[in-house]
Amino acid sequence: MTETLTTLRLISFPGTGNLPLFAGTEKGFFETQGVEIALETTPSSMYQAQKLVAGEFDLACTAVDNVFAYQEGAGEIELDRDPDLFIAMGATQIELCFVVAPDIETFADLKGKTIAMDALATGFAFVLYQMLENAGLSGDDVTLVSVGSTPSRWEAVRDGKHAGTLLIEPFTSTARAAGFRVLESSLDTFTHYQGQVYTASRAWAAANRESLTAFMRGYLDALDWVLAPANRDEAEAMLARNMPMMKPQAIAPAMNKLMAARTGLTPGATIDLKNLQAVLDLRARFGPNPPGGPDKYLDLTYYDSVMNDRSA
């Protein structure tokens, strides 16, 4: 066992997708690789991007579109330098559910209402734009309000401040249990869509290659543990312990989503280029500053070296 651990500062959104991070710490997978994770959950994508680029965090788990947006100068907050973020490894596929108040039965009922968002032009915003467009609504029909990360958005809808929002697990299950309606799932909107990824500064990664690859090794071991059916009961207990706001009845449905490759953790933390391209296509359609192709934002050399060692 390594005596002195290297601390890696990681900022992520609250959600069940953090379970491998919990497992990596509690089961000792990170410690075995000589690192420990100081995990902070972010109140918004703007805060996360600003703090990561400023060097207050080493790594982030974020919606892949946030990487595209800030690299193209299309983020919603000013940064203290030109960013050099890259996609280092996959994290999750994701199901985004458009959850609305019980009295909203159709998209037409949303006219004149407000919808809670994280940011208005990054992250998963364009998923909602596509849903609204498919339903025949335009930006003039609703008012989009920046509220923050998923817990804040769910609380705003739950408390009647806004008519709807996009949610991920475990918040979707919590909303359903409280009588709120899922108007549309991203699984019905898109065939391919990348969810979250791990990102870092290229300069930081180059200067801290050993720490980054140690994190990846620990994460991949933890991911394998979480996905192993034999560990399901222990993993559920771990999730409940680390996310105490979850209702007991929401744990099993959230875990079911997390274990499914299309809605949860990505086996092997792989990146599917078709899924990346789908997100880029959405940004090109709805956002400013048309992005480049996937290769512009990827550097899988660190990940590939770890995978080569694991298969040796």
Image: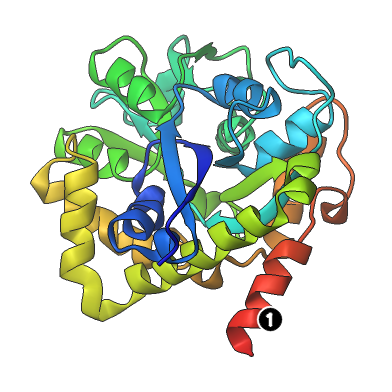
Instruction: Give how far across and how far down residue 300 sits, in percent.
Output: 75, 62
Q: Residue furthest bottom?
A: 312
Q: Residue 244, how many percent across, how many down?
A: 17, 38
Does residue 252 appear in this view? Answer: no
Q: Decide which of 219, 18 is in the foreground and name it.
A: 219
Residue placed farthest to the front in the image? 3
SS of the residue under disc 1: helix
Residue 10 appears in the figure: yes
The residue nearer to you, when weighing 95 against 203, is 203
Give the quarter of the figure containing the C terminus: bottom right
Residue at the image position 72 percent from the left and 63 percent from the top: 302
- Residue that numbered label 1 is attached to: 308
Q: Is residue 7 above or below residue 123?
A: below
Count of numbered badges drawn on the protein: 1
Please provide percent x and percent y for residue 219: 48, 62
Asked if 271 appears above or below 99 in the picture, the reply is below
- Residue nearest the viewer, comparing 209 with 290: 209
Residue ranking furthest to the left: 248
Looking at the image, residue 200 sits to the left or right of residue 63; the answer is: right
Residue displayed at 35% across by 33% down: 99
Q: Would residue 113 be found to the left or right of residue 132 on screen? A: left
Q: Position of residue 52 (x, y in %)?
A: 63, 29
